[in-house]
Amino acid sequence: MRWRFMLFLALPLLLLAALPLAQGAAAASIFDTHSPSGSSIATLFWIVFGIAAVIFVGVEVALIAFTIRYRQRGEEGEPRQIFGNRRLELLWTGIPALTLAIVFGIMVVTMRGVEAGPVNDPNALTIEVIGHQWWWEYRYPDQKVVTANELHLPVGQPVHLRLRSDDVIHDFWVPALGRKMDLIPGQTNDLWVQADSPDVYTGSCAEYCGLQHAGMRLRVFADTPDDFAAWVVGQQRGEPPLSGAAAHGRTLFFQSQANCVSCHVIDGTTARDNVGPNLTHVGGRTMLAANILSNTPDNMVRWLLNPQVVKPGNRMPNLHLSENDARDLAAYLESLK
Ligand code: CUA
């Protein structure tokens, strides 16, 4: 009986001791923030955690001490019964109420700071984020750039994300950059993010949105201002000159058998339909299929031969392409840097 009792007491302490390990393991986590709002959320967490830890340790120590000090030592009958002690009752009502009031206060301050963002900052960059089953569309209205799945933003500059959805509810969440927010059909939500240091930050859709919810991953490239400007110029460039397999791939792309044009956009061409990701610069992306495959010619061929094997349930059907046609199409798409 006694070992069970000891285990019962030790379990919460063991869990507490394991916490720093969990923190170390989760490098791209809510504890490893790279943005002002992410940092204030993490700070709030540690303050609340600290308060809770002090209370937990205090209660456990008192519990153990009193259990040992006042255990039954062979006396007969009931112990002396004590009722009503006004000072004690005031204390154990007042202290928790005060503690909760403090936690509430710092929480409201943090929420207001994270919510507001630098609303009237003329330096802010606006990006429209549109959720689709199961990929992300990014539109830079001022730069006239549209891309998919890989979000580029400059470090040190406030970014105003305008979030909406093309179908069901999705949720944009890159833990290193702060809070998450839903993308809701028929509504636009605003989220302010700012990256402090250049890096690639990952995240995922955080609202169950169907079969490939888990395959709706996020990659945010926080670029230096120069790299970002160069990226924008690259995105504004038109189609490169083509020859050989890539030129044949282009012909296939615009033919009815492959039927790519009925779902995809390539700027400056007749491919103008927005069902699937904009492919104007697909060759320049690091990943494919909403960040589940690295962007290599072989993976592109694999995807084109049967997208339903790579990512079951996605909107792109099996086009029954021959191996050679798939290779040529991949050559064309990979040339679109
Ligand atoms: Cu989109 Cu889950």
Image: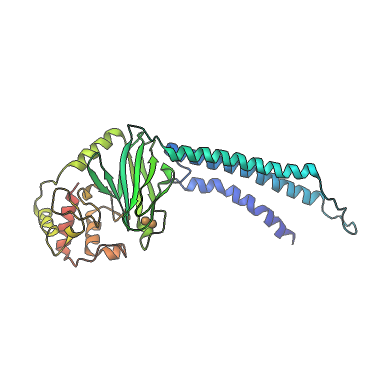
Where residue 181 sits in the image (x, y, percent)?
A: 41, 48
Q: Quadrant of the N terminus?
A: bottom right
75 vs 191, nearest the viewer: 191
Residue at the left extreme?
243
Q: Residue at x 25, y 62 (%)?
A: 316
Tell me if residue 152 can be seen: no
292 vs 148, nearest the viewer: 148
Q: Residue at x 44, y 36 (%)?
A: 36
| Location of residue 220 (image quadrant) | top left
Residue 273, placed above or below residue 323: above
303 vs 101, nearest the viewer: 101
Q: Residue at x 20, y 56 (%)?
A: 273
Where residue 55 sits in the image (x, y, percent)?
A: 66, 44
Residue at the top extreme?
122
Residue at the bottom extreme?
320
Where residue 151 sits in the image (x, y, percent)?
A: 31, 45
Q: How is the image coloured?
A: rainbow
